[in-house]
Image: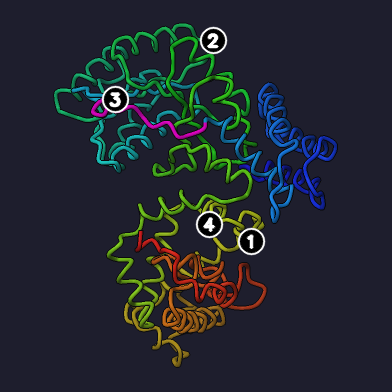
Amino acid sequence: MFDALSERLEQAWTKLRGQDKITDSNIQDALREVRRALLEADVNLDVVKEFVAEVADKAQGVDVVKGIRPEQKFIKVVHEELVRVMGDSHVPLAHQQNQGGNGPTVILMAGLQGTGKTTATAKLALHLRKEDRSTLMVATDVYRPAAIDQLITLGKQINVPVFELGSDANPVEIARQGVAKAKADGIDTVIVDTAGRLQIDENLMDELAQIKAAIDPDEVLLVVDSMTGQEAASLTRSFHDKIGITGAILTKMDGDSRGGAALSVRRISGQPIKFIGVGEKVEALQPFYPDRMASRILGMGDVLTLVEKAQEEFDLADAEKMQEKILSAQFDFTDFVKQMRLLKNMGSLGSIMKMIPGMNKMPSDMLEKGEVQLKRIEAMIGSMTAEERKNPDLLSNTPSRRRRIAKGSGYPEKEVSDLIRNFQRMRSMMQQMGQGGGLPGMGGMPGMGMPGMGGGMPGMGGMFGGGGRPGWRGGQGSSKKKNNKKKKGFGEL
């Protein structure tokens, strides 16, 4: 979502290239580009003015160390200011046990209509479950048709119970009984989903205040659609003035919004962003870290979040077994499909690439072709027999098998042959790289050790077959890391 902002800010750095130091005269063009970039990203005007003034004040006259160019120093100043504007550090959820309390932690969810509040409730419940916190969701939205059913369905999907009294009960009473139920059952955290409302709907706003008074929540989280831009900050401040909130969840951060919400909410409303929604799947919720977001905006990637996402998906014992299979050239098509699916669980190819430093400039059409090609590869492998998947050598010298796979998958026989040839080449390369001291790609991370993108992403590069394919060839980039033995893989964390 920050692509346009990143491109604009990069134009600001170019204004300082070739300069000996940062001065009042040569910084003005760069500041103008920063101001234009923020305004186009729909950042609140007051935030833009303060941001530019702070950057100008900190950057002018700063000493440029030998070996560090002025634009690099300027980027550092902008990065620090982005972090400050978005909140300095991550603000975790309250937890009664950490505060010496003996009851459940109570979280009240609020938001406007259509912001994805009910889905965000389920996402948060799943996030807490992954932290080994038992959770109960409470359905108090008796106004929207099927709202209760939606929460129940999501609850079954993530294996989290839902407390409800039907659509005829009083929302305040549902919330009160739900919290009592959680306390009686010894549940760690209760999340109360409320009805979406309009700012001008005084009755619903009064009801929300009554629910808050009845359950005395530890957290009041406002779910905000990031597509609303700088208006998101005003909404957060408005809700805070009326009911008092403790933080915000920004949804649809994976969309084409311009980023103004993320840069405006904390500064205008005074309340921190605690989570961001990065997709439609119930797993697509991430804690909000201002420093990581600033790095993404400046095209520096976000390796920490990538590692955390990978740790959620990869079993370390499986990763070690996979590494052994790769080193001994026993890696087969069944293993390859497993790795592709694990990658899918981490998110889209585009979202993963943007977390890797230097990969944020990959054209979107290239990423789209990569996604399509992964599906084609999976279809071809799906047309193989179990024996063929476990023993790829069977396919190398048997044209009849390749023809059968081509017919079964619906793709040309040449593509099947290219897949098999490149897979065999990849296995040999991986074995050679392993014997040379470490797997290729991103420090030899188990489960990520496929050729392409410097050896780091499955299905990219060497697995694409014929010419004109997206991505890099498997051999490129990987060889540069051949002797880099000190980098850690996920299996070493």
Label 4 vs label 2, nearer the camera: 4
Rendering quarter of residue 412: bottom right
Mark sitting on residue 349: 4
Q: For the C terminus, which image quadrant? A: bottom left
Report how far apart the C-alphas of labels 1 and 3 lie in the structure.
Answer: 43 Å
Against 69, residue 417 (above or below) is: below
Within 10 Å of the Cα at label 2, are there few (<14), some (14-19), or many (20+) other Cα atoms?
A: few
Q: In x, y percent, where is residue 336?
A: 41, 71
Q: What secondary structure is found at the residue carrying circle 3?
A: strand
Q: Residues within 10 Å of mark 4 (few under 14, many from 20)?
A: some
Q: Are marks 1 and 3 in contact (CB under 8 Å)?
A: no
- Which residue matches tag 3? 138
Residue 94 is one of the magenta-drawn residues:
yes
> Is residue 272 depicted above or below 174 in this figure?
below
Residue 205 position (above or below residue 349): above
Up the image or down, 212 lies above or below 118; here it is: above
Q: Which mark is residue 366?
A: 1
Q: Is residue 454 magenta?
A: no
Q: Earlier in the sequence, mark 4 or mark 3?
A: 3
| Amino acid type indicated by mark 1 | Met
Real-space Cα separation, disc 4 to disc 3, in angstroms: 35 Å
What is the CA distance from the residue labelled 2 to the residue labelled 1?
45 Å
Pointers 2 and 1 in contact (C-beta within 8 Å) = no
CA gap between label 4 and label 2 equals: 41 Å
Contact between marks 1 and 4 (CB within 8 A): the answer is: no
